Image: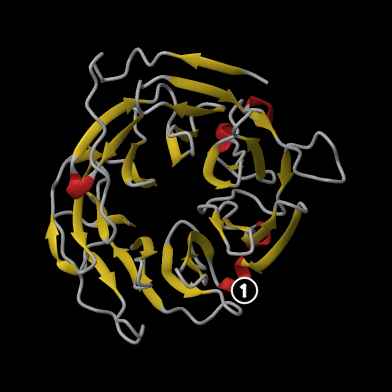
Amino acid sequence: LVVLTLLNCSDPLPEEQSPLPEPIAPGSAFILTTALTYTTSSLATFSIEKPSEITDDLLLASGDAVLVKLGHWLGILNRGQDSNLHLIGSEGQVGPQYALPGCGPHDALLLRDGRVVISCYEAPELQILSLESGEIELFSLERFADADGLPELDHLALVGDVLYVTAQRLDRENGFSATQAGLLIGVHIPSLTLMDLSPEQPNQPALELPCRNPYTRLATTSRGSLLVGCVADFQTPTHAGLLEIFPDTAQVEVITSAETLGGYPSDLRVSPEGTPWVQIYTPSPHDPYTTEQMAILSLEPTPQPPRITHAGFTLAGFDFDSRGTLYYALRGQEAPGLYRLSEDNSEVLPPLVLTLPPMNVAFF
């Protein structure tokens, strides 16, 4: 077990760093918009009370960025060459920007002690960041790496004092191919130690999942379980599907297969009412690298007919606001924008149009 602390010397913050921004008010929403060429991104904001009144082009971000909620703040994870976390406050107020050396961040969440934990895709470690000082503590998960030395740490979930991390374990030497099972790793956060996840097998700090390439976010349910979607190589449905994991008993159940879904689960959300929804990607039967369609559907009580479908590789992120309204980001050349369903889910309302096509959305 290796735990290191480093001073973030390459951090863009001077000794007197920018103050933390004001907390974001409930009912606020933010949209990350990204050029179709993935060269640049921008941030927009609106209130769910008046969704048509959008403030666009608040600031620029990298073309490979993602939004994360960090308590009452928004984080922009820039995942390009210059890995960093940009903290955003009320109405898009710009806060400090923290360098994340060598990380390639994929997910982040706010811990109870006020620090932020970040999963690294380009390093076999978690980075634990102090927002006050910019100092980073490294927690090594190198023991879970495959032959290329990197476990491809992806999404995070915090349940009680245990941080759960998915590891994709892709073969970088062969085009990031999914050749082995993904992992769920448990870390006891207060003590920064690995957890035994299997009551029947001591010294097992990870569960081997019955699928390859866990790809979606780790969603928590009201019964304390975790949901995750696996995509394998987006071509082999045998190793793909949706899982429900019960950490207390180390039980893992396959909710549904990719074949039953009719595609590969590329995003996953739980509505305010507790209903899981999934976004699926269906490749062309003639060419696995061409998208036939994408869809969003409910999983309760079983996978339902798609509520939203679009041809091609056009759907990006989706989420629910606090009222349970579903919003989804549509990209592509035709009618891009942030769409939402009506209150009774019976119709799709006209889109919120932005300067760049939307990538994902975050609600407070």
Q: Secondary structure at mark 1?
A: helix
Q: Position of residue 87 (x, y in %)?
A: 29, 37
Up-down relation of residue 59 to residue 126 (above or below): below
Number of other residues with Cα within 10 Å of mark 1, as a class: few under 14, some 14 to 19, many 20 or more: few
Residue 355 showing in the rendered view: yes
Check disc 1 and give the amino acid type: Thr
Up-down relation of residue 254 to residue 65 (above or below): below
Q: Position of residue 196 (x, y in %)?
A: 76, 38
Please name the residue shown 23% across and 41% down the image.
Answer: 22
Q: Nearer the viewer, residue 253 or 213?
A: 253
Please name the residue shown 71% across and 36% down the image.
Answer: 195
Q: Nearer the viewer, residue 360 or 180?
A: 360
Q: Nearer the viewer, residue 241 or 115?
A: 115
Q: Position of residue 148 (x, y in %)?
A: 61, 27
Residue 283 showing in the rendered view: no
Q: Nearer the viewer, residue 1 or 34?
A: 1
Quarter of the image where the C terminus is located = bottom left
Please name the residue shown 62% across and 38% down the image.
Answer: 169
Please name the residue shown 33% across and 66% down the image.
Answer: 328
Quarter of the image where the N terminus is located = top right
Corner quadrant of residue 149: top right
Q: Is residue 50 left or right of residue 316?
A: left
Up-down relation of residue 156 to residue 151 (above or below): below
Q: Position of residue 218 (x, y in %)?
A: 55, 52
Q: Which residue is labeled 1 in the image?
A: 260
Q: Is residue 144 left or right of residue 79?
A: right
Q: Is residue 162 left or right of residue 195?
A: left
Corner quadrant of residue 54: bottom left
